[in-house]
Amino acid sequence: MRILGIETSCDETAAAVVRDGREILSNVVVSQENLHAVYGGVVPEIACRAHIESLLPVLDRALQDAWIALCEVDAFAVTCTPGLIGALLLGVAAAKSLAFAADKPLVGINHLQAHVYAAYLGPGAEPPRPHVSLVVSGGHTNLYLTRGPEDQELLGGTLDDAVGEAFDTVASLLGLGYPGGPRIEAAARGGNPKALRFPRTTFGPGCFDFSFSGIKTAVLYHCRGQNASLKTPARPIPDLPDVAASFQAAVVDVLAAKTLEAARAHGARAIVAGGGVACNTLLRERLAADGAAAGLPVFLPPRALCTDNAAMVAGLGYLAYRSGRLADLTLDAVPTP
Ligand code: KG4
Ligand code: ZN
C-alpha cells in the first residue's frame, strides 16, 4: 500500500509517500526557518501563509519523487493534532480534498505518535515493546511508555517550556539566532561543559515531568546579570562557548537520566527518541551509552526523520489504516490533543 502523508503542524510543509508503513518512496520538506528567523520563533500567521504557498508544489514533488500519480495513492494520512490551529487546518483541508477527489481513504494522525513512529521507518527497525519514547521538540517534551505505535501512555511531560523552546530562547540570549538547537550545539563544540553548573530540575524519583524555565533564567542571569529580564540590554559574553556547552550538558543530563529511570521503572525493553531535539549529538551519544550500559537497545531515527517530516505521518498512517481507524470528511484539526 502506498500512503501519501501530509504534515503542516508547525513551520515545515511536508509530504511523503511511504510503502507498507516502512519504505520511504519520497520525503519532501520545505522549511520556513528563514521566514521566522527574524522574529526568533515561529509566527503562526506567517506559517499559515507559507503553507498555502508551498503545499501544492510540495505535494506534486512528493508524487513525482515516488514516481506515482495521484490515482495510484492508496490512502491519505494527515497530521491533525497537536499543532498550530491554522497550520493544521491547511494540511487537513488539503488531505480531505485529495481523499475526496481521488475517492480514497483518509486517516488523521497524532504528530507526537508520528515522531515516535519515525524510529520504525526503514527495513528491520522494530523496537521491542514496550519501550519508552522520549519526544523532544520545539513544542513538546514528553516521555511515553509505548505498547504499540498508537498505544502510548504518557508518563510525564514538561510543566513549562518544551526543551526545544529552551534551546531556542537560550540561543537568542546568546545572540546565536534561530533555530537555536543546532546553533547551541555548534557553539558548544568549543566550550567546556563543566565550566558552569546550571540547574538540573528533576522532581525526584518516580516523577517523569520536566521543567526548563529555571535553566533559562539561570543562563539569562549569568549573561546579563542577577535579576535581569529579557529586556535587559545584552552585553558581551566572553565565555559563550562554555555557556552553550554547560547549558547543553545540563539539559541532556536531565533528559537522559529521566528516560533511563522511566525505562527501568516500567520494565521497558528498548529506548526510542524522536523530535527535533533528538538531532542533538550529545543527547544521541548519551542515550546510546546509557542504554548500552543498561542492556537496552536504543532506536534513534536518522536526523532528517527527527525534525518534522511527512514520512513519519504516512508510515503511521499505514498502521492506522490497517487497524481500520479511518476518518471521514468531518476530520478536524485539534490544536491540543
Ligand atoms: O520536531 P521539530 O522539528 O518541530 C516541532 O515539532 O517543534 O523540532 C524543532 C526543535 C527546535 O526547537 C530546534 O531548536 C530543535 O528542535 N533542534 C535541536 C537540534 N536541532 C533541532 N535542538 C538541539 N540540538 C539540535 N541539534
Ligand atoms: Zn514535531
Image (cartoon, helix red, strand yellow):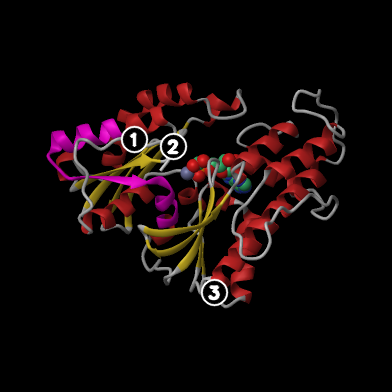
Query: In this figure, which residue is indicated by the disc labeled 2?
Result: 83
Q: Indicate the position of residue 317 as horizontal and vertical percent values.
A: 29, 51
Mark 1 vs 2: CB contact within 8 A: yes
Q: Secondary structure at mark 3?
A: loop
Q: Secondary structure at mark 2?
A: loop
Give the mark nearer the N terminus: 3 vs 1. Answer: 3
Report the residue that reaches farthest toward the left: 103
Give the mark nearer the N terminus: 1 vs 2. Answer: 2
Query: In this figure, which residue is indicated by the disc labeled 1?
Result: 333
Query: In this figure, which residue is indicated by the disc labeled 3?
Result: 296
Mark 3 vs 1: CB contact within 8 A: no
Instruction: Check disc 2 and give the amino acid type.
Output: Gly
Give the mark nearer the N terminus: 2 vs 3. Answer: 2
Residue at the (44%, 49%) spot, across then down: 112
**Cα–Cα span, label 3 and label 1:** 37 Å
In which quadrant of the rendered image does the C terminus lie?
top left
